[in-house]
């Protein structure tokens, strides 16, 4: 009996340590809500300005939906039970330092008058706020919960508006690539035309692919949609990457087809078609059209995963 009792003694410190660990994890979890409330109070005015900016911006209007989509994805994962775990202190410190660095950079540039664009101001301060929030999650929710909900949490990065230099770069890329796609379509169709950079000289009219015709808004929405769809329906990392990166050529082809369609209408119906609804309000229709190959690719990738699972089980 003495031997059995002595063998139980070493287990007691482990039990106490485990209980202390769970207790500390639960205590850190209780601090999550107060920390988030404090963060919202600190960033209340920038968040208000971000909401106003998103309401008035045609490109960044999607920002208002991102927190709700993130919360929905979080609740989907919440159905899977995750136990208490130790805070991810290293990651919490890293994100907090990142938030401080971005905030310090914003203050430094502002004092020197180097952040003139509203997009750049909101991008810096929103990124700082998101990093602070991720730091709170890493410390208060614990390693296991953060790992389980990594995608919904990181999805909040889409609330950061595109800085002006990045927006201009994407617009320029989409302008020239869409012009190239339209060039190929005009060649295949047999339409007589000449092209100089972004200007198409067609019979009876000249078309220019302007920045407003770059399709950046539709491409960005499709890009965000690809992240959500790959997360919900695909398991393989490389297949998720295929779906996400397929959005780039898909957006180029869609926009090139739109330029081609408007050009053909102007040639065969009349130059007045440049002022038609299909030019000024046709974006949603071409976006819906681009969803067809997008979902076909998603279905094919999903089916390929179903085939690989039985093969793996047999092996």
Image (spheres, rainbow, N blue to C red):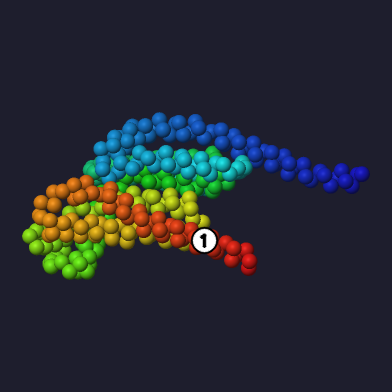
- Note whether residue 235 is visible: yes
**Residue in view at x 50 percent, y 48 percent:** 150
Q: Position of residue 311 (x, y in %)?
A: 59, 66
From the viewer's perspective, tell me whether residue 234 is left or right of residue 47: right
* Residue visible at 9% across and 58% down in the picture: 205
Compared with 206, 118 (above or below) is above
* Image spot of residue 35 (x, y percent): 48, 33
Q: Is residue 135 visible?
A: no
Furthest residue toward front: 269
Q: How many marks?
A: 1
Q: Position of residue 37 (x, y in %)?
A: 45, 31
Q: Residue furthest left?
A: 204
Q: Which of the 4 image quadrants contains residue 290? A: bottom left
In the rendering, at what x and y percent does residue 120 appear? 28, 45
Above or below, comparing residue 210 to residue 42 in the picture: below
Of residue 157 and residue 283, the one placed in the foreground of this image is 283
Quarter of the image where the C terminus is located: bottom right
Residue pointed to by mark 1:
305
Question: Which residue, as the protein is rendered here, is positioned at the far right?
Answer: 1
Instruction: Name the element at disc 1.
Output: helix
Q: Nearer the viewer, residue 207 or 177?
A: 207
Neighbourhood count class around disc 1 (C-alpha, 10 Å): few under 14, some 14–19, many 20 upward: some
Seen at 49% across and 42% down, the residue is: 74
Which quadrant is home to the N terminus? top right
Q: Is residue 73 left or right of residue 114?
A: right
The residue drawn where x is 50% and y is 32% is: 33
Relative placement, left or right, of 224 versus 311 is: left
């Amino acid at each position: 009996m003495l031997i059995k009792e002595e063998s139980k003694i070493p287990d007691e410190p482990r039990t106490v340590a485990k209980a202390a660990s769970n207790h500390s994890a639960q205590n850190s979890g209780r601090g999550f809500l107060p920390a988030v409330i404090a963060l919202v109070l600190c960033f209340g005015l920038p968040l208000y300005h971000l909401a106003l900016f998103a309401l008035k911006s045609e490109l960044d209007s999607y920002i208002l939906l991102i927190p709700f989509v993130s919360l929905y994805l979080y609740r989907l994962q919440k159905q899977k039970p995750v136990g208490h775990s130790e805070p991810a202190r290293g990651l919490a410190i890293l994100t907090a330092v990142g938030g401080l660095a971005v905030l310090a950079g914003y203050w430094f540039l502002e004092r020197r008058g180097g952040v003139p664009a509203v997009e750049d101001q909101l991008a810096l301060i929103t990124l700082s706020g998101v990093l602070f929030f991720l730091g709170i999650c890493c410390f208060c929710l614990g390693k296991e919960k953060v790992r389980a909900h990594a995608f919904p949490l990181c999805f909040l990065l889409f609330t950061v508006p595109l800085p002006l230099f990045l927006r201009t770069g994407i617009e320029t890329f989409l302008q020239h690539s869409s012009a190239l796609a339209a060039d190929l379509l005009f060649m295949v169709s047999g339409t007589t035309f000449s092209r100089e950079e972004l200007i198409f000289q067609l019979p009876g009219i000249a078309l220019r692919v302007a920045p407003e015709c770059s399709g950046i808004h539709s491409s960005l929405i499709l890009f965000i949609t690809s992240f959500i769809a790959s997360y919900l329906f695909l398991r393989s990392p490389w297949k998720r990457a295929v779906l996400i990166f397929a959005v780039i050529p898909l957006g180029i082809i869609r926009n090139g087809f739109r330029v081609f369609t408007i050009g053909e209408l102007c040639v065969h119906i009349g130059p007045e078609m440049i002022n038609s609804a299909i030019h000024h309000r046709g974006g949603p229709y071409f976006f819906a059209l681009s969803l067809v190959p997008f979902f076909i690719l998603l279905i094919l990738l999903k089916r390929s995963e179903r085939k690989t699972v039985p093969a793996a089980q047999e092996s």
